């Protein structure tokens, strides 16, 4: 029940396309859902996060869609660029508890 | 800029030779975490400090220890590194939800890449 399942494991998108990464969770107590971006040899960096009281949050080209009833949330990257090539992790937590990470998605944007 | 700093960025040690990794933060966060990340995997939480309270994960080997002498610094000690301990070690901090309304936004350092020969 503590798991967060992330898919796909890897994703290749053409420059200018839309990248979509999905996550699903079981624990309904989760109340914070961040996405982290990690470049090779670097630590993860918070990209965008959402709480379950909203269904969508947009920051620039990055959007989180949240479906509370389905217990799913997804990251959409619009107009994907080669600089977006990285590994993306979804995560979840409740209260101020520790994060539960998804397995990660390696995103490659072809020029 | 406020940040999480890890030293060294790269550490090479020999099998069985103790090694210490350090983390410092200028965010004045009360929670500090140590993660182990192996290639193509998600970060795996080893332990964390909530202020001075140490919280060990159930599956963290005894080989891994930690010290937090003050709010700003935290150390990861690997007493007898094995080949399987070669990984990226990440330090992260959070304000424990105090300023973020209950969220657990974590700020990660750049990591220390540990090689065991």
Image (cartoon, coloured by chain):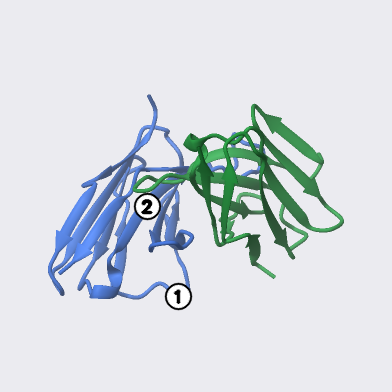
Chain colours: A green, B blue
Residue A71 pos. (x, y %): 79, 58
Circle count:
2
Identity of the residue drawn at 40% across and 60% down: B37
Quadrant housing residue A8: bottom right
Identity of the residue drawn at 71% across and 55% down: A30
**Which chain letter goes with mark 2?**
B
* Label annotation for residue B90: 2
Nearest-to-viewer mark from 2 and 1? 2
Tell me: B84 left or right of A1: left
Q: Nearer the viewer, residue B108 or A20?
A: A20
Image height of A58 relative to A75, above or below: above
Residue marked by disc 1:
B59
- Image quarter hosting the N terminus of chain A: bottom right
Residue B111 pos. (x, y %): 33, 48
Helix, strand, or loop for circle 2?
Answer: strand
Q: Residue furthest top?
A: B1
């Amino acid at each position: 029940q503590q798991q967060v399942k992330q898919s796909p494991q890897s994703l290749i998108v053409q420059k200018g396309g839309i990248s979509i990464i999905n996550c699903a969770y079981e624990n309904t107590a989760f109340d914070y859902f961040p996405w982290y971006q990690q470049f090779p040899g670097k630590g993860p960096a918070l990209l965008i996060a959402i709480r379950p009281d909203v269904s969508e949050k947009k920051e620039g080209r990055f959007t989180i869609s949240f479906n509370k009833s389905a217990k799913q949330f997804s990251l959409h990257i619009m107009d994907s660029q080669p600089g977006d090539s990285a590994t993306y992790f979804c995560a979840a937590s409740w209260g101020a508890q520790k994060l539960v990470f998804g397995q990660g998605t390696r995103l490659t944007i072809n020029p | 800029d406020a940040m999480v700093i890890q030293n060294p960025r790269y550490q090479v040690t020999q099998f069985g030779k103790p090694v210490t990794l350090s983390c410092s933060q200028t965010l004045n966060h009360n929670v500090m975490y140590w993660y182990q990340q192996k290639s193509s995997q998600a970060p795996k939480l080893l332990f964390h400090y909530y202020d001075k309270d140490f919280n060990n994960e159930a599956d963290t080997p005894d080989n891994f220890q930690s010290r937090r002498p003050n709010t700003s610094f935290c150390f990861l000690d690997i007493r007898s590194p094995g080949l399987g301990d070669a990984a990226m070690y990440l330090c992260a901090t959070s304000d424990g939800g105090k300023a973020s309304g209950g969220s657990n936004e974590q700020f990660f350092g750049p990591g220390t890449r540990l090689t065991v020969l």
